Image (cartoon, rainbow, N blue to C red):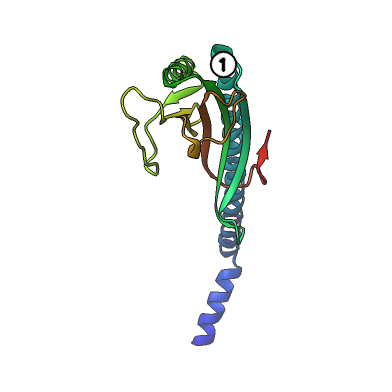
Amino acid sequence: MLMAKQKISFSSILSPIGRHKITSLVVLVVLVVIGIFVYQAVAVRIEKHNFEQARAAIDKIYADIVAQVGQPDSHRRTNECSRLSRAFNNGPIYCEVASDLAYGVPGESDANRLKSEIQGTINGSGSIFRSSSAPASDIIVKPAPGTVNSSVDYYKTHEGVMCSFKYTYDLPSEIDLSIKDPSKKIFELSIGCWGSARKLYYPTSSVS
């Protein structure tokens, strides 16, 4: 009886219907694997494109700001990615594209004027950046009314990449750039767009 059951089972597997089921299962598994690889490749391409568009958006708004308020005393352009654990070269990947501008100003009222003009330029470029609320991970310290000491405005690119515009006036601990006239105060604007990434699109820090 047992031998008969085994023969029936074995013969059913080898039957055309059984072979068709096995073939269909193999094809399904192959299609799923291919689909996963295709999805990952497309996701990486879109993500890289989004960072490239964010870089282009920053370069465009930088040019608009310079056209509106003049050339900065100094500037910096940065593209970089990093991992959560640099020591072991693993963990989640984080990428950022950024530009920093520094202007020398006689005093706080001039810094406030510059900030107002820059904000007007940014808000007038609705096709480049859209106003956004602060990300939950950020801790916002609001400056006193009427001052520019340190404040941050948040935006998103058309593709949804989070960006920040940080305005800093006469705070050496938060300012990285220098100005030509040491008798003036430093007003610095830091523009950055960032986000998690699937790959190291900028393997090492790239500064120009």
Q: Is residue 88 left or right of residue 2?
A: right
Q: Residue furthest top?
A: 68
Which image quadrant: the C terminus?
Answer: top right
As shown in the figure, which amino acid type bears the numbered disc 1?
Answer: Asp
Give residue 49's quadrant in the image. top right
Looking at the rendered structure, the number of numbered marks drawn on it comes to: 1
Q: Is residue 45 left or right of residue 107?
A: right
Instruction: Using the image as rendered, state which of residue 120 and residue 24 is in the foreground.
Output: 120
- Residue 67 placement: quadrant: top right
- Left or right placement of residue 185 versus residue 63 in this view: left
Q: Does residue 38 sit above or below 2 in this rendering?
A: above
Query: Which percent across, then down, holds residue 51?
Result: 58, 35
Circle 1 packing at 10 Å, graded few (<14), some (14-19), many (20+), is: some
- Disc 1 designates what residue? 64
- Measuring from the top left, give residue 187's x and y in whole percent: 50, 26
Nearer to me, 142 or 84: 142
Residue drawn 31% across and 25% down?
145
SS of the residue at dot 1? helix
Q: Residue at x 60, y 24 (%)?
A: 59
Q: Position of residue 78 (x, y in %)?
A: 62, 36
Q: Residue furthest front?
A: 183
Q: Residue at x 55, y 60 (%)?
A: 21
Q: From the top left corner, tell me how far across and down residue 96 is, in percent.
A: 56, 39
Q: Is residue 158 above or below residue 205?
A: above
In front: 186, or 143?
186
- Residue 5 to residue 197: above or below: below
